Amino acid sequence: MTEENKVPPAAGDAPAGEAAPGSDAPKEGAAAPAARAEGVGPRREGGPRREGGPGGRGGGPRREGGGPGGARKGKRQFFRKRKVCKFCVERLDSIDYKRPEMLREFVQERGKILPRRITGTCSRHQRWLHTAIQRARNIALLPFGAGL
Amino acid sequence: MEHRTYDLIFICRPATPEEEVTKVVSTLEGATAEKGGKIEKVEKWGTRKLAYRVAKHREGQYVYLALSSTQGEMIKELERRLKVNDAVIKYLTVRTDEELKRQRKLTAKRERRLARRPRKAAAAPAAPGAEQGGASA
């Protein structure tokens, strides 16, 4: 993350998380427009600096899993409802790409594939699912993305 | 040589008449017969809405074929014919014999285990023995 690159010149050994806002602010004010000039700029000045921990990439607006994450202290809960893999429970031996209605449960409305931690799928079946979804996309049974 | 099976799906333009579609299928049949292959199944799924625009169309007629062959070059020939044909806007070939083999192996393994320990089958998701590589982590 660019955060870490910018912090050392300002505050030396400050950790990525709770960097001292006081000492950083003047330097960041000068460096921010010049250095980054991207959408990351305005978000850095305030609160989300704390999220520089393990969940650090773009910690502010997170689309899914935002609810049960609750008060994010830089650590996310995995498997928030202890879901089980649907394919393991139903003992399906293969995932058919020709049946998009089944695949649609694992795909967002925009067409993006849902991550394992949201759907609770096990890794093996997530790989199979990925292949099946890609094939279905190639044959226009599922979209690649919204607005196409 | 090994017997290979394939799934071939192609999409025709929505306004294509029925006999045109049949003509495409028979062309493919001829090409597979030449190369020593066989068509196992032909399914016409009819007109379906496409998930995105293909060649400026929003709908298409889907046709599904299941093929088997001993030669790999057959697929190249079939795809060449489909590409040349104007009515066909999209096609996809998937090789399925490896996957079917794995699927059968898993089913057979599970049935063997169930036959050996019929009582434990009820408590399945938590059963040890690493069914399918450890499902519930």
Image (cartoon, rainbow, N blue to C red):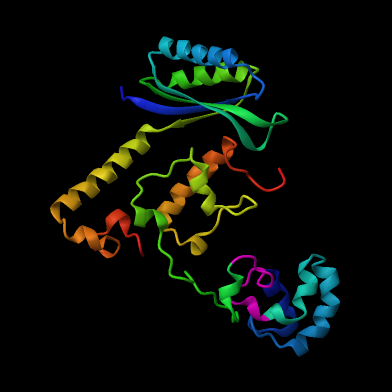
Q: Is residue A8 visible to the viewer in this orientation of the structure?
A: no
Looking at the image, is B37 positioned above or below residue A22? above
Q: Main secondary structure of the magenta part?
A: loop
Q: At x 39% / y 16%, what residue is drawn?
A: B37
**Side of A134 relative to A7 (left or right):** left
**Would you say residue B97 sits in the magenta stretch?**
no
The picture places residue A97, in percent across and down from the top left corner, at: 48, 40
Q: Which residues are magenta?
A: A50-64
Q: Residue at x 57, y 38 (%)?
A: A141
From the viewer's side, name the closer residue of B84 and A108: A108
Q: Quadrant of the N terminus of chain B?
A: top left
Q: Is residue A55 magenta?
A: yes
Q: Is residue A131 above or below residue A65?
A: above
Q: Is residue B89 left or right of residue A102?
A: right
Residue at point 16%, 56% (across, down): B118
Q: In the image as oriented, which residue stretches furthest toward the left?
A: B116
When the figure is inspected, residue A128 is found, relative to residue B55, above or below; the finding is below
